[in-house]
Amino acid sequence: MENFSFYAPTYFAFGKDAENQCGQLVKRFGGSNVLIHFGGGSVIKSGLLDRVKKSLAAENIAYTELGGVKPNPRSGLVYEGIKLCREKKIDFILAVGGGSTIDSSKAIAAGAVYDGDFWDYYEGKPVEKALPIGTVLTIAAAGSEGSPDSVITKEDGMIKRGASGEAYRPKFSVLNPALTQTLPAYQTACGITDIIAHLYERYLTNTKNVEVTDRMIEALILAMVNEAPKVMANPNDYDARANIMWGGMMAHNNSCGVGRSQDWTSHNVEHELSALYDCAHGAGLAVAMPAVFTYTLQHDVMRFAKIAVRVWGCQMDFDNPERTAKAGIEALRNFLVSIGMPKNFAELGAKEADIEKLAHTCCYGNGNTSGKISGFTTLEQKDVEAIYRLML
Ligand code: NZQ
Ligand code: ZN
């Protein structure tokens, strides 16, 4: 295991009606003048926004509202939010929604206290300062409620990039599983796929002897595979929703990723797809993961065989471990299809003619002059093109 430090000080308020604690929580973490940021309207329709505002009003906390975050959040609204924060002297940002709303809030939080262009952070500048953020999560997926990361799409060129820094980690996150019961089935499945991807990206490591985190990852994937059919069959299954929600947080606050190298190839490959075609991140991952894993299998056949046996219940073929490894990838693909995820380029709305462009942006975008992406393996543009071809 490698040396590491781990400090993830987000306060979680978990359970039914937890959103009614918002006012007290904002106060506890020093907010008195809040920007409430939200998406395309689901939180208005469900009545959640009203409950959050009531909770703030009960503590005499002033607030300004900014809605309209789109999935794959855009830089345009971030600039608007930054301007609003300065005009209104906002001292706390409350994200009410999914990963897109939380990521947009994080970008606004950093941009509001920075003289330069917030996009600098998405070109590699470390995020060292930001307004404090709280979240009320409405979809178990991105894990942004407990992560120091944010992913934004710049309209100019439709470039999707991530930024990271401790200043981005939410001070508190409200996790009420009942809030996810209004999700369309497709979004629920996209979220579960993203959670599983966050676990696989950590499982694919070159670090030896990391049995504790290996076992944590395996357990979390197994739990997702067990709970997913329950929520697909019954969207109001509170306990299944609760397990998925906490699993989504655990999958990405890095408690399962410490002390080991990580992959992130599937995410790199996927981000180009959701940037160009505006597909859901989870849907893009459902198509990307089996292709990436098939292409990189030879790098460490036994690692893929191990997850095939321990998670997917495949029989270990000691004479031909590659067969076991491939059976595990097939089992993952079948599971994703069973919950309604797409399996190829066409179902995503992606085009074969764009493959060269997608692979080029993936390897050279954002000032990357090496032309390579590194994680579990190191890949060049020709490799990434081959991966996109496997998705056809
Ligand atoms: O906008 P509204 O009307 O709220 O509708 C949303 C949106 O259309 C809807 N929704 C959310 N909660 C709902 C609901 N509809 C009904 N009832 C509810 N309770 O679901 C749609 C998707 O929302 P979004 O916030 O986009 O989903 P998600 O949480 O999957 O976030 C995706 C974004 O997160 C990024 C992705 O790249 C993508 O841009 N990621 C962020 C990460 C991070 N910050 O750590 C890591 C991830 O790997 C990921 O890259
Ligand atoms: Zn993800």
Image (tube, rainbow, N blue to C red):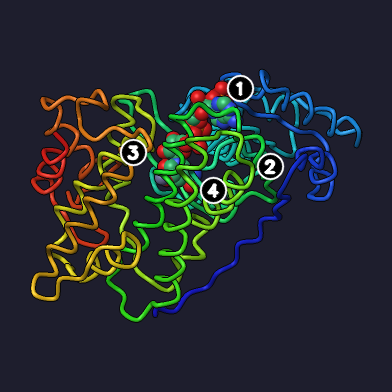
Write the residue at 61% across / 34% down: 236
Rounded to the nearest whole Å, what is the CA distance between mark 3 and mark 2?
Answer: 26 Å
Q: Which residue is mark 4?
A: 244
| Mark 4 crowd level (few <14, some 14–19, many ≥20, 10 Å Cα) | many
Question: Helix, strand, or loop for circle 1?
Answer: helix
- Which part of the image, by quadrant, shows the C terminus? top left
Name the front one of labels 4 and 1. 4
Q: Amino acid at mark 3?
A: Ser
The yes-or-no answer for disc 4 within 8 Å of ligand 1 is: no
Disc nearer the start of the sequence (4/2): 2
User: Image check: 202 left or right of 4?
Assistant: left
- Which part of the image, by quadrant, shows the N terminus? bottom left
**Residue 327 visible in the picture:** yes
Disc nearer the start of the sequence (1/3): 1
**Residue 79 visible in the picture:** no
Identify whether 30 is placed above or below 351: below
The yes-or-no answer for disc 1 within 8 Å of ligand 1 is: yes
Q: Which residue is mark 1?
A: 42
Q: Which residue is mark 2?
A: 176
Residue 34: % across, % down: 76, 33
| Mark 2 crowd level (few <14, some 14–19, many ≥20, 10 Å Cα) | many
Q: Amino acid at mark 1?
A: Ser
Q: Which mark is residue 338?
A: 3
Residue 16: % across, % down: 74, 42
